[in-house]
């Protein structure tokens, strides 16, 4: 299985000339089924215009070899999104892979109808450059050698017209809410 542990995490991302705060929650329903939620807020705005979006979904993990779970496997996510800034709702699937220290999920063009069992799409998920792929957006959660968890968000600039929101390209550390003292928790919780 993956070393990335369920929990509550915070990260701050640049979005245009503003900064947004993502609160990510990952909960394990079973060994191969995880729940996921994300709340994105503006950091420097009034409380009534604070929320940008809420996402909720599940991660279904499929092991390559059930006798060797440390090898990793494939992952499929089904996400429901409520975008408050655009007053829209959206459902989409993401596909990818996981290893002992990494979880990678990619959202593909909706007109391609990707399948988790199609190796063509899984190979695109591993590409360094997104520009020549069918990937709209890729998210990576990675545990480095020092035990820090990093979150990387990338979008394909050639396919931005398929997205109904601005997605920041970033690479930031995820801070576990359990590691924050009271003063830091209040600072990160207040608008």
Image: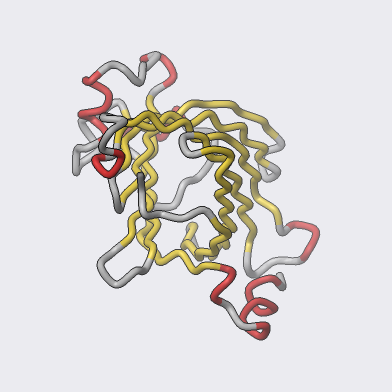
Q: Residue furthest right?
A: 48
In the image, 147: left or right of 92?
left
- Between 147 and 52, the one lying in front of the other is 147
Q: Quarter of the image containing the C terminus?
A: bottom right
Above or below, comparing residue 191 to residue 59 in the picture: below
Q: Residue at x 30, y 26 (%)?
A: 134
Furthest toward the front, the residue is: 67
Quadrant for the N terminus, please: top left
Residue at (49%, 69%) from the top-left corner?
A: 175
Residue 42 image point, x, y percent: 63, 61
Give me the residue at 61% from left, 81% from top: 184
Nearer the observer, 130 or 32: 32
Q: How many marks?
A: 0
Left or right: 187, with 11 as reference point: right
- Closest to the observer: 166 or 39? 39
- 26 vs 39, left or right, is left
Residue 56: x percent and y percent?
62, 39
Quadrant in the picture for residue 108? top left
């Amino acid at each position: 299985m993956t070393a990335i542990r369920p929990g509550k995490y915070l990260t701050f991302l640049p979005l245009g000339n503003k900064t947004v705060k993502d609160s990510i929650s990952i909960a394990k329903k079973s060994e191969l089924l995880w729940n996921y939620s994300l709340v994105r807020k503006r950091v420097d705005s009034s409380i009534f215009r604070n929320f940008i979006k809420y996402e909720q979904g599940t991660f279904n993990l499929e092991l390559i070899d059930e006798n060797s779970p440390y090898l990793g496997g494939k992952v499929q996510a089904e996400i429901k999104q409520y975008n408050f800034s655009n007053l829209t709702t959206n459902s989409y699937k993401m596909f990818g892979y996981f290893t002992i220290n990494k979880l990678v999920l990619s959202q593909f063009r909706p007109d391609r109808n990707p399948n988790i069992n199609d190796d063509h799409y899984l190979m695109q998920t591993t590409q360094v450059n997104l520009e020549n792929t069918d990937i709209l957006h890729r998210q990576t959660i990675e545990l480095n050698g020092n035990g820090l968890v990093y979150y990387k968000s990338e979008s394909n600039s050639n396919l931005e017209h398929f997205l109904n929101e601005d997605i920041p390209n970033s690479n930031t550390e995820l801070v576990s809410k359990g590691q924050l003292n009271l003063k830091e928790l209040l600072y990160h919780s207040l608008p």
